[in-house]
Image (cartoon, grey):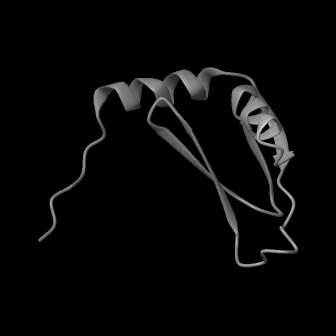
Amino acid sequence: MADKVEQAPAIVGMKAKLAALPKVKVKIPVDKQNPKDLDVTVQINGYTYLIKRGEEVEVPNVVKEILENAKYI
């Protein structure tokens, strides 16, 4: 039987901080040249967002800024 994986306290704290931030809606377009590339991963201090392409989602503004800087949106 597999043991339950626990998150490190720092990651749990980062999750709470990110959850408290104002949210914005973003939509990452589907990559027509790479149609099998369905997700975009964004990590902030150990906390991971897995964002599906082509779907509008709400994320903290800092995640939107990362996506803009990386030219995803």
Q: Is residue 50 left or right of residue 28?
A: left
Front residue of this view, candidates 70 and 67: 70
Give the residue drawn at x 52%, y 44%. 48
Q: Is residue 29 left or right of residue 22?
A: right
From the viewer's perspective, is residue 13 above or below residue 25? above
Give the residue drawn at x 83%, y 37%. 68
- Quadrant showing the N terminus: bottom left
Q: Is residue 29 left or right of residue 48?
A: right
| The furthest residue to the left | 1
From the viewer's perspective, is residue 12 above or below residue 41? above
Q: Position of residue 3 (x, y in %)?
A: 15, 59
Q: Position of residue 20 (x, y in %)?
A: 61, 22
Which of the 4 image quadrants contains residue 69?
Answer: top right
Q: Position of residue 35 (x, y in %)?
A: 78, 78
Front residue of this view, candidates 16 and 46: 46
**Count of residue discs:** 0
Which of the 4 image quadrants contains residue 8?
Answer: top left
Q: Is residue 69 left or right of residue 51?
A: right
Front residue of this view, candidates 5 and 48: 48
Q: Position of residue 12 (x, y in %)?
A: 39, 31
Give the residue drawn at x 81%, y 60%. 55
